[in-house]
Image (cartoon, helix red, strand yellow):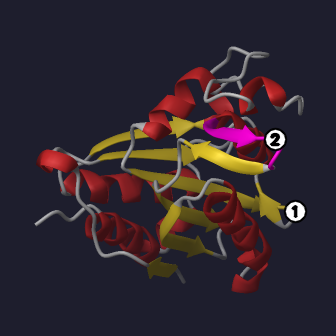
Amino acid sequence: MVEVRILLPYFYTPGGYPLKVIAFVASPRKQGNTDTLVTSFLQGAQDRGAETEKIYLYDCTINSCQGCYRNCWLGPGDCTRFHDDMNHLIPAMITSDLILFASPVYMASYSSQLSVFFERCIPVHHVDLERKIIVGNRLKGKNAVMALVHDSPNPATADLPFRSLEHTLQNNFQMNIVGKLHVPGVRDKGDIAHKPECLREAFLLAEKLCYQP
């Protein structure tokens, strides 16, 4: 079973340049079920001529946010406390046209590494602390796809993590959620291969989103 939701049929790049699609794999297991789903999605994007990149968050050095905020919120700059892989990951998102966030479900949430990553995305905001409003956001309007994979056969298992992920992307980062992939009932490495319809749907979703007439 796979659930796919498409909110926008396609979008354009200025001058007809190839779309740039980036995917964040928030699973510690390479070539596992989440990773395999991402691969199918990126293949669909490549089929439409998009430039693609896959990033394994568990391979990245991402220090935990210390909650100082003022160092990154007072201006449209980057974190001044740490200089790690976030120095490259944030610009990669900013220059992308479509971003896939894919994670297994752990303890009724997306993975902890994805949470650490989102926390360190705070520098994309420029905040007026006196008025307590966001006056700048370098991810605003970016197109995003959510993908969750879990071992429970009950699709409702992903309801809470999907709501959390949607809130983070849509409310916190003001991104446009243009697609959703949900694959329940897979546990061991390779299980998703027994659900070819899931991989096909991921492929077709990327094709539709990257279609440029």
Q: Earlier in the sequence, mark 2 or mark 1?
A: 1
The kind of residue tagged 1 is Met
Q: Which residue is mark 1?
A: 107
Quarter of the figure with the C terminus? bottom left
As measured in the structure, the alpha-carbon distance from the residue carrying label 2 to the one carrying label 1 is: 34 Å
Tell me where residue 10 appears, x and y as whole percent.
27, 69
Q: Nearer the viewer, residue 55 or 64?
A: 64
Q: Which residue is mark 2?
A: 129
| Residue 184 in the figure: left or right of residue 42 | right
Query: What crowding class fits label 1: few (fewer than 14 Cα within 10 Å), some (14-19), or many (20 or more)?
Result: few
Please check the rendered image and state whether residue 89 is part of the magenta-colored stretch, yes or no: no
Mark nearer the viewer, 2 or 1? 2
At x 74%, y 79%, the residue is 159
Q: Is residue 62 left or right of residue 25?
A: right
At which x and y percent is residue 94?
Answer: 46, 38
Write the start and end of the magenta stretch as one range.
124-131
* Amino acid type, mark 2: Leu
Residue 152 vertical position relative to residue 76 in the rendered view, above or below: below
Q: How crowded is the residue under tag 2: few (<14 C-alpha within 10 Å), some, or many (20+)?
A: few
State the residue in front, 134 or 176.
134
- Residue at 65%, 56% in the rendered image: 103
On the question of residue 195 being in view, the answer is yes
Quadrant containing the N terminus in the rendered view = bottom right
